Image (spheres, grey):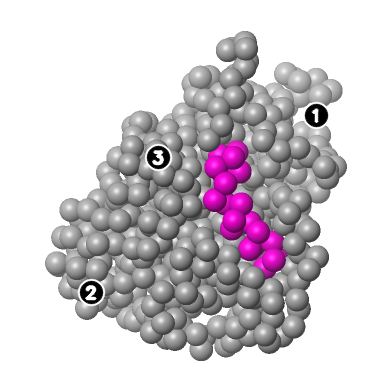
Amino acid sequence: MSVVKFYKEDQQVPLEMHKVRVVQKLFLPNVEERVKNLTEAGNNTFLLQNRDVFMDMLTDSGVNAMSDRQVAASMIADDSYAGSETCNRLLKALQDVFGTKYFLPAHQGRACENILAETFVKKGDVIPMNFHFTTTKAHITRLGGRVEELITEEGLDPDILLPFKGNFDIKRLKKLIKEVGPEHIPFVRIEAGTNLVGGQPLSMENMLEVAAICKENGIMSVLDASLLQDNLYFIKTREEEAKNMSIAEITRKISDAMDIIYFSARKMGFSRGGAIVSNNEKLILKMKTLIPLYEGFLTYGGMEVRAMEAMAVGLYESMDEEIINQGPLFIEYLVKELDDYGVPMVKPAGGLGAHINASKFLPNIPHEQYPAGALATALYIAGGIRGMERGSISEQRNPDGSENYAELELLRLACPRRVFTLSQIKYCADRVKWLYDNRDLIGGLKWEEEPEVLRFFFGRLQAVGNWQEKLAAKFREDFGDSL
């Protein structure tokens, strides 16, 4: 991996290893318009219109910039319904990257989760994982299964500086298997890069140990590789055993140990779509009939063929250290900027984005007023920046209707790959810093319309009191005519 140092050490910043050839104009509404937009969106950043967003840091899913080679590849797509050469090229890329013989296409990662759950999960089953993802858990619980989160204790502490805070607690995994019985555990899910707890990675050693325990007990090991490319970077740079291995070698060592791998290409591969891959033909055959039923024919599975061509190229590019290091380096820079200022961050910097510890940022807002959601709305007011609440709003209520409070209340500032310039990252840091200085003005939120499932996607909330108008007035006082 290349190292580029600046002559003036105090000017050391991440260096883009690409040049920009296509641009998209951005718009920044004034602060009064931002308050109005929030109200119309029900204080849910998912419901904001993109035309009203200056920096879209909601997610890195499907919004990463494609390379010139990906765009070029999309022009040769074969849209034949059956026997498509596009499908053959994607299969070849998957075989080269993961070393797997078999491939099932799906339109995105949560579609893969649906196929897995429908095939293997039944009422009363227990699915251990280092940490859940929202849709993963929803697919399992709707079928009567239950999720057991087995992340290490340190993984839920935002301030502990450990390299692999997404690791499984191996002792707890062994204990759970013994208590529940392998016959009630259809598979163990390994999320390589924890989405909901700060993008913290797992070590290669930990993943291989989990896979070995699964094999010993006759349980399937399932790798969610959606965030794998960031995790590969952290393994390469933080794990001693991997420092002399290539990204491709690390990938193959991990994938060879797994029974099933699935991923969202909206993250892994810089494109759109999803895939399930395996070397086990019996497992593939069990899932295969559900693809035409839910997704589409086996040559495309609901994906647009141009996206499949882009995915194939993107998978090869994900093996390039100079490509996959860009996200983590920019995230690390943003985390350091904010941490130096005193903003409570999840540390060390992980993948996917920078994560603000909203509970510490807003200690006076009670859990039931959703501090992470409130902070997301405050940041939009402060800078037209759309982040994503990753706290209690992202959870679902308990069966008895009581609130299921998240272990961490985080505001995620996703950094889509090759999208933002350094000046935009610095603008984001500046607006968060201003907000931190004025955090006493921020209040809570309450539900106005609350869906029963995945409420964070389209639920609507109200501000508790008129704190948003007060925050906007303070912004105008401090920034004058500036947007």
Amino acid type shown at disc 1: Leu
Dot 1: what SS? Answer: loop
Dot 3: what SS? Answer: loop
Amino acid type shown at disc 2: Gly
Q: Is residue 289 above or below residue 182?
A: below
Dot 2: what SS? Answer: loop
Query: Residue shown at 53%/77% (left/top)?
Result: 104
Extent of the magenta region: 307-327
Relative to 325, is 148 on the left or the right?
left
Q: Position of residue 281 (x, y in %)?
A: 41, 82
The residue that disc 1 covers is 483
Q: Dot 1: few (<14), some (14–19), or many (≥20) neighbours within 10 Å?
A: some
Observer able to see residue 118: no
The residue that disc 3 covers is 244
Distance of label 2 from label 1 (alpha carbons): 59 Å
Q: Main secondary structure of the magenta part?
A: helix
Q: Dot 2: few (<14), some (14–19), or many (≥20) neighbours within 10 Å?
A: some
Q: Position of residue 93 (x, y in %)?
A: 58, 65
In this view, the mark in front (2 or 3):
3
